[in-house]
Image (cartoon, coloured by chain):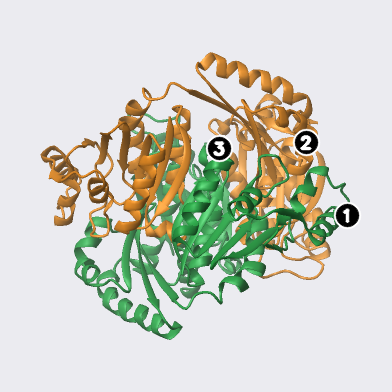
Chain colours: A green, B orange
């Protein structure tokens, strides 16, 4: 069962918008046993969209469209699919009622433009939209399934889960099972050296490494006829790989690094407090994104200025003068300070130069110092990252988590 | 000059990885006057990749590939392009030297697998990679330009800027100029009502609204022969639109909402301090992502527990007992407390239930209370957001910024 996703929207072609819908759809369809073989993006352009539909119906069994169901004149997905399949557009009274009700519930007047959204291709049926005015469409035509979904993610996702999943889950006889090995501290080439001999002989399950920010992951995918077979294949491959991956693998059950770190903190009866300068709260926010973190998260400070480092974390004024705010000594003092004032067993301090200004030859943009203290034992470390302000901050958070992981594992 | 992006990688097809490369390439190519008409993703699968190359060369002038240049056996982009263009693969000695040097500089041993990366199609030339081992490739064949780039963004982006931009910028005679109107406080349908009469008559510049998290933007794009013409068209369209957009438009020069807010704080001689509970530092980190923010950002606290709200922000214990931690009264007390202890003229407090646990019928998951105080005048507001923990936090930050914007604008 080959799947294809066609995303319609100029905003994606010119790079304004990140294509998160296609990722969501790919993941969801894969889980349902559909092999997504193609993702395509075309603009709000009838001729090109028609061509994309023609190509897709030749090679794919399930074609999921997203975008172009809006009320404005440049929304043309429904009309173009109807044209390709030689269907007419008909007004769906029930859909019109739903749209009217949507506005009534919100005490807003329905715009005339929204009436257009109640039309559907004659051979299709409406998929309900609980979160917006654009209904989706499902068409089965000559063994090919066409699913048209709205572009806004908050409308697309619930519609996919409630209306599309029941349609798709009966289609595929294959089961796709996969496991991701998340690694830190090893590059893609070195990984190819240590597990290449396993990768080369394995086609199903397929073993594929891919690079991530500051790290590399491995995805193992099995295509089988039953869930049990899939599970067994994945477990067998895990047993083959783990002796090589053990030093690098922090998770193979979809846990994020912050989840793993929070879990280790809980298990070891620690608590944590964090003081951030250049990362501005990003590390705290990542850690607080883990449900249940309240048991171990004591406190966070965003101390961007020297004064606030002194006032809130008791970093000595003289130390900042002597070493500079971006130094391992100050990062350690921040870590120790925040642990002490927050009564936490673990303290983290981050101070760096995220740019674009503020760099010097001795302390260039991208230099980030971190301090870690665990039960009164402290270490400092300095990183040099490339990239813009955002990238430097993202790297900083990743390496802070990596370091915490190593320290807690030791 | 029609452009196409072909991204090669199973990790994108199964939804593991968000396709940020394609967005970056689309944006960069558009700026260079190339109309990106197609984005395609295919897997590491020779037959499908060949078909994608055949389709692309029929319809596009510039084809940019990303991914599949790695050292492992499933990286096959170069080899497949060579096959499509009937070229052989040849070892490029200079590229091999570069790869050797890359490892030497890092005091690492070059893996055998990396030798594969020094091969190129016979009709192509190498594009240098300063940040990794996979060189890029440029081929001109029968009026079509083929550009092969590595997958990791930190390798792809500098290569595009240094090596590819000089190739592409001489190709197009069209100039594409665009402006994005970023709005808050209006939906897509209402927008279609108020500016529909302008959108309907305008084909060049093209006026296209698109929905964003909690808001809608409008993109105006002009295709002209000269930069001056493009600029004039954009200015003329701005003059047409702005009377309608003025109440909603916070920026049309690519400034983010946080940049606009920081600028307003600077201009009004304010300073800000932020206390966050459920957002865990995310609002601070967004604000601190603005360069130059140190002039106005006093301090941030991540007070996740009730105790830390009391200790650091002086929120009265009795108030938390009476109203609950997630209440407008406590959010206001947090805002006032953080402003006072930080000596800031503006204070923000956020307290909410991000889930998945902790919701009650009276205070369900997604309920977020915010307090704002400016020069001692305080207001509180309550939002109800849908979605998972991350989405609720993202919405919270967006609406906190929107509210700050409105308050500062008033």
Tell me if residue B89 can be seen.
yes
Front residue of this view, candidates A272 and B362: B362
* Whether marks 1 and 2 lie on the same chain: no
Q: Position of residue B346 (x, y in %)?
A: 72, 38
The residue lying at 38 percent from left, 34 percent from top is B61
Badge 1: few (under 14), some or many (20 or more) residues near its Cα, within 10 Å?
few
| Residue that numbered label 3 is attached to | A307
Chain letter of the residue carrying label 1 = A
Foreground: disc 1 or disc 2: 1
Location of residue A219 in the rendering, given as x and y in whole percent from the top left corner: 36, 66
The extreme top residue here reads: B228
Residue at (56% x, 74% y) in the render:
A169
Distance from disc 2 to disc 3, alpha carbons, whole Å, reads 28 Å
Q: Quadrant of the C terminus of chain A?
A: bottom left
Image quadrant assignment for residue B99: top left
Residue A382 visible within the image: no
Q: Is residue A67 left or right of residue A268?
A: right
At x 59% / y 41%, what residue is drawn?
A44
Residue B81 place in picture, x, y as percent: 27, 46
The residue beneath circle 2 is B407
- Disc 1 and disc 2: Cα gap in Å? 30 Å
Q: Is residue B191 above or below residue B75?
A: above
Whichever of callouts 1 and 3 sits on the residue coming sooner in the sequence is 1
Identify the mark at residue A274; answer none if there is no mark: none
């Amino acid at each position: 069962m080959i799947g294809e996703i066609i995303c319609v929207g100029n905003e994606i072609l010119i790079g304004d918008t990140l294509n998160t819908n296609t990722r969501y759809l790919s993941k969801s369809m894969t889980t349902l046993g559909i092999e997504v073989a193609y993702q395509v993006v075309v603009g709000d352009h009838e001729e090109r969209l028609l061509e994309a539909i023609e190509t897709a119906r030749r090679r794919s069994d399930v074609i999921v469209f997203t975008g172009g169901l809006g009320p404005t004149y440049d929304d043309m997905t429904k009309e173009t699919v109807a044209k390709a399949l030689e269907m007419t557009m008909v007004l769906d009274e029930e859909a019109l009622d739903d749209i009217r009700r949507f506005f009534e519930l919100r005490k807003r007047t329905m715009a005339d433009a929204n009436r257009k959204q109640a039309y559907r291709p004659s051979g299709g049926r409406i998929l309900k939209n609980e979160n917006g005015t654009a209904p989706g469409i499902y068409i089965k035509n000559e063994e090919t399934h066409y699913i048209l979904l709205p572009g806004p993610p908050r409308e697309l996702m619930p519609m996919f889960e409630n209306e599309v999943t029941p349609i798709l889950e009966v289609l595929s006889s294959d089961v796709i099972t996969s496991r991701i090995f998340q690694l830190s501290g090893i590059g893609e080439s070195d990984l190819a050296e240590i597990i290449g001999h396993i990768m080369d002989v394995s086609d199903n399950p397929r073993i594929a490494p891919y690079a991530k920010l500051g790290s590399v992951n491995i995805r193992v995918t099995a295509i089988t006829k039953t869930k049990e077979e899939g599970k067994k294949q994945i477990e067998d491959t895990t047993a083959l790989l783990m002796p090589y991956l053990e030093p690098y693998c922090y998770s193979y059950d979809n846990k994020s690094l912050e989840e793993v770190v929070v879990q280790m903190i809980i298990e070891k009866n620690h608590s944590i407090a964090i003081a951030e300068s250049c990362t501005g709260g990003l590390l705290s926010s990542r850690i607080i994104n883990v449900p249940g973190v309240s048991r171990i998260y004591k406190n966070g400070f965003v101390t961007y200025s020297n004064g606030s480092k002194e006032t809130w974390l008791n970093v000595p004024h003289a130390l900042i003068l002597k070493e500079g705010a971006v130094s391992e000594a100050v990062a350690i003092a921040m870590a120790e300070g925040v642990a002490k004032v927050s009564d936490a067993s673990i303290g983290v301090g981050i101070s760096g130069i995220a740019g674009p200004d503020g760099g010097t030859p001795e302390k260039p943009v991208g230099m980030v110092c971190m301090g870690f203290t665990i039960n009164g034992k402290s270490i400092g470390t300095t990183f040099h990252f490339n990239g813009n302000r955002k990238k430097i901050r993202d790297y900083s958070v990743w390496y802070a988590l990596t370091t915490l992981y190593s320290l807690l594992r030791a």
